Amino acid sequence: MARKSRSLLFVFLAILLSSALNEASPVWKRKATVGGWRPIDNPKDPKVVEIANFAVTEHNKEASTALVFEAVVKGETQVVAGTNYRLVIAAKDGSPTGSKQYQAVVWDKPSLKFRKLVSFIEISN
């Protein structure tokens, strides 16, 4: 009986210690949870730039505009059934004020060769 109690106590303490260490770990070292937004480390990554170009092109088709992509300022990704990209994009619209910033959300499912512009709005710099 005492041996069984010690074994259970050991297992309980191991679980408790593991839980405490996980809570004490820095947030940036924890794995992303499905559904949470994570910052994009490199906005110049070719895949991110491709997604941003897609967003501008699709917006131009849908809104009959002529925006010209300049750069990805920053962005985040979200794991869903595929990946959502929430990007801040710099683009020119032909006005004398220069480039403006837009926030675009693109849903990408590379395994199905599917990509959809979910939203595209102008934001203040």
Image (tube, rainbow, N blue to C red):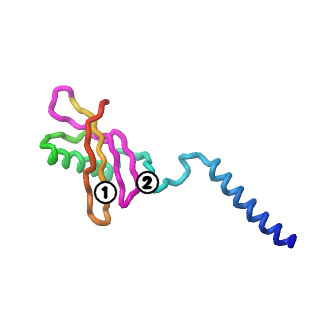
Q: Give the camera-side residue of 94 and 42.
A: 94
Q: Is residue 117 magenta?
A: no
Which residue is more in the foreground, 37 or 67?
37
In the image, is 9 to the left or to the right of 2? Answer: left
Q: Is residue 35 left or right of residue 16?
A: left
Highlighted magenta segment, given as a residue range: 71-97
User: Which residue shows up at 14% across the image and 41% down it?
Assistant: 65
Q: Position of residue 26 (x, y in %)?
A: 59, 46
Q: Secondary structure at mark 2?
A: loop
Q: Which circle marks residue 35 in the picture?
A: 2
Q: Amino acid at mark 2?
A: Gly
Q: Assess whether mark 1 and mark 2 are in contact (beta carbons under 8 angstroms).
A: no
Looking at the rendered image, the disc whose residue lies closer to the viewer, 2 or 1, is 2
Q: Which residue position is annotated with label 1?
A: 108
Residue reaching furthest top? 97
| Amino acid at dot 1 | Asp
Residue 88 versus residue 111 in the image, above or below = above
Mark 1: which secondary structure?
A: strand
Query: How far across and down, in percent of the image, does residue 44 sit?
Result: 34, 45
Tell me which label, 2 or 1, sits earlier in the chain.
2
Q: Is residue 30 above or below residue 109?
A: above
Which residue is most to the right? 2
